[in-house]
Image (cartoon, rainbow, N blue to C red):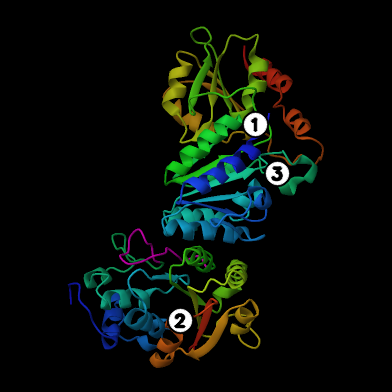
Amino acid sequence: MDTLTTLGYEDLPSLLTRLTGDEKHDWSSLSTLDAIWVLYDRILGDGDRFLLSKGHGPAAFYAVLAAKGIVPIAALDGFGSFDSPLGYHPDRALAPGVDFSSGSLGHGLGVAAGVALTGRRVWCLVGDAELEEGSNWEAVQYAGRERLSSLTALVIDNDSSTHGWPEGVERRFMLEGWAALRVDGRDHEQLASALAFDPAGERPRCVVAEVAR
Amino acid sequence: MSGMRERFYEVARRALDEDERVAVVTAEIGTATLGPHPRHVNVGIREQLLIGVAAGLALEGYRPVAHSYAPFLVERPYEFLKLDLGHNDLGAVLVSTGASYDAARSGRTHQAPEDVAAVATLPGWTIRVPGHPDELERAFRDALAGDGRVYIRMSEEQNHARVDGGGFTVLRRGSPGAPLVVAVGPSLAPALAATAARDVTVAYLGTVRPFPREALCEALGDGTDVVLVEPYLAGTSAAEVSAALRARPHRLLALGVENPELRRYGAGSEHRAAHGLDGAGIARSLAAFLP
């Protein structure tokens, strides 16, 4: 497993173990793992962009990139070390296949709005707690009014927001003019159906992927 | 004579028509004056988004121009300059208006004497401080033709004539060993007035980052005294002068907008005088500093 190759979902635990050296962790608990896997396995095509706005905890992202042959599997060793291209927050200048350097919360959706203005298809992953940052709402309001239909916000909702989103965070997106729906964040069929690009869509889309914490 | 701001809108409009790579992002400020264009987007009063959208456009190969008042273009979304543009290694042209105290009547909220110092702490930025509309146009066109991160600071204050060259230009040469006065952007006119009767070398600087360390050493010659006149926070380029002259004894007087908040309204010219940056003020500082 030292060369660029294409692996399956069932290989992700071993890749994650190799990434972190932790052999006891239940990797299925990673909140972003299934959504990112479905995106890369079934949704993203040539020229599409994925912006991981929630840059902390990028292990699932790196594992999926490795499974898809984008990141060399050998690069998983030494995660976070001085010579590694893979840090605790992704750096697009270092990591192959990373479109956006992140870590500080609340930056991805604004950049994604700029990308979507050009008509490029872009998926941006944010967390429900990340949405506490006010900068997100500047982007949500603008993208909704401008009907940036090539933009999909993927909200991983593991109920991490301290003050919460009464009646569901998707209602805020809908109020701003987005099409929004909530799916089981572990159900690959639901995720794939919700995340698939709709060429007839006229609004940006918000997919809330609910996962247990 | 029209000002820098009017010239900026004129050139931006032409650039939108002539160069498909150019996109202009505004946040209400200047939106109506610039006028509608398919690649002019107004994000509303959302300055974090202003920079984020510019970064997204750059990611897609466009040459984004972001424009607003200096405090809203630089200070409010500062981390977005650092990360969306800088850390993501994306280029953009940021063009501010308002400078240190153009909007003195609007109070502290619309004043940004700290902007150049703030941008200068970030790696990879070119910072240009034109002193005349012609210089503004040249700086802006140069920036549009490139792909790096450029901050252009416009102001209502301007010199009587443009200085050609764009960088560090010696305008008047004193006797060997004479003090060197470096005037930045619109500080040139009062600096020339203040030094008219003095044996000094006067140099003009319109591009403050990267700072022209070698040119400064060369212009100083065998002299030891340097006077820096900057139309923003005093001392913004003092460390650059020290670095340029680290191997030789020297004295530096760094003039600029003083750090304590001047809690006054009024005209920009009154603020300039209050900070000692008019001709009389600079002359007083020179008299106290130079033998």
For label 3, the SS is loop
Q: Residue A49 appears in which quarter of the rendering?
A: bottom left
Q: Which residues are magenta?
A: A90-105
The residue that label 3 is drawn on is B111
Relative to residue B220, is residue B64 depicted above or below? Answer: below
Q: Residue at x 24, y 74 (%)?
A: A69
Near-viewer residue (B7 or A84): B7
* Image mark 3: chain: B
Q: Amino acid at mark 1?
A: Gly
Q: Main secondary structure of the magenta part?
A: loop
User: Would residue B233 be seen by someone viewing this image from the given angle?
Assistant: no
Measured Cα–Cα span from mark 3 to mark 2? 46 Å
Residues beneath discs 2 and 1 located on the same chain: no
The chain to which mark 1 is attached is: B
From the viewer's perspective, is B54 left or right of A11? right
Quick one: label 1 or label 3, which is nearer the N terminus? 3
The residue where tag 2 is placed is A198
- Mark 2 belongs to chain: A
Q: Is residue A91 magenta?
A: yes
Question: Is label 3 or label 2 in front?
Answer: 2
